[in-house]
Amino acid sequence: MGLTQVSLKITNPKDNNKFVQDDFLIDSGASYTVLPQRMVNKLKLKPSWTQKFSLADGKKITRDIGSAVIEFRGRKMATPVVLGLKHDSPLLGVITLESFGLSLNPFQRKIYETKLMLA
């Protein structure tokens, strides 16, 4: 199975002059979008709470959660993000992806607009 990456612009919600743009791996198994420490530091993002996570191999980790504005395909939205550590990779998680009304087709490695439900 191939990997699917997209370019995202990430902005500090309290200071839109602070932004980064980079390629993010779409991880359909990750709930939250992950920003590596270098991005967190450049954007000066602050944690709102700490969350425990289970990794695919069963390992447990803890990471801070904050907020960022993500821009993709001309749309901007505030979303919760994992404030990652130095060696964490930039990942686009499903909460952000679905908030944009998008889904991933992993077989074709393409993003498509999806049907959204209110109830």
Image (cartoon, helix red, strand yellow):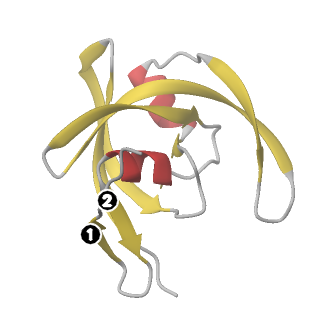
Q: Amino acid at mark 2?
A: Leu
Residue 26, image quadrant:
bottom left
- Residue occupying image coordinates x 32% and y 11%: 14
The picture places residue 106, in percent across and down from the top left corner, at 44, 79
- Secondary structure under the numbered disc 1 in the rendered image: strand
Q: Tell me the quadrant of the picture where the C terminus can be found.
A: top left
- Residue of label 1: 112
Q: Is residue 97 above or below residue 45?
A: below
* Residue type at tag 1: Tyr
Mark 2 in CB contact with mark 1 (< 8 angstroms): yes
- Horizontal arrangement in the rendering, residue 93 relative to residue 83 (left or right): left
Sequence-wise, the earlier of marks 2 and 1 is 2
As drawn, the label of residue 102 is: 2
| Outermost top residue | 14
Q: Position of residue 31 (x, y in %)?
A: 57, 49
User: At 29% across and 61% down in the image, what residue appears?
Assistant: 115
Q: Residue at x 45, y 62 (%)?
A: 25
Mark 2 residue element: strand
Q: Left or right: where does residue 63 sit relative to residue 33?
A: right
Res 110 visible: yes
- Few, some or many residues within 10 Å of mark 1 (<14, 14–19, 20+): few
Position of residue 85 relative to residue 114, above or below, is above
Query: In the rendered image, is residue 93 in sight?
Result: no
Q: Reply above or below: 20 against 33.
A: above
Indicate left or right for 93 with 97 as reference.
right
Residue 23 pos. (x, y %): 36, 56
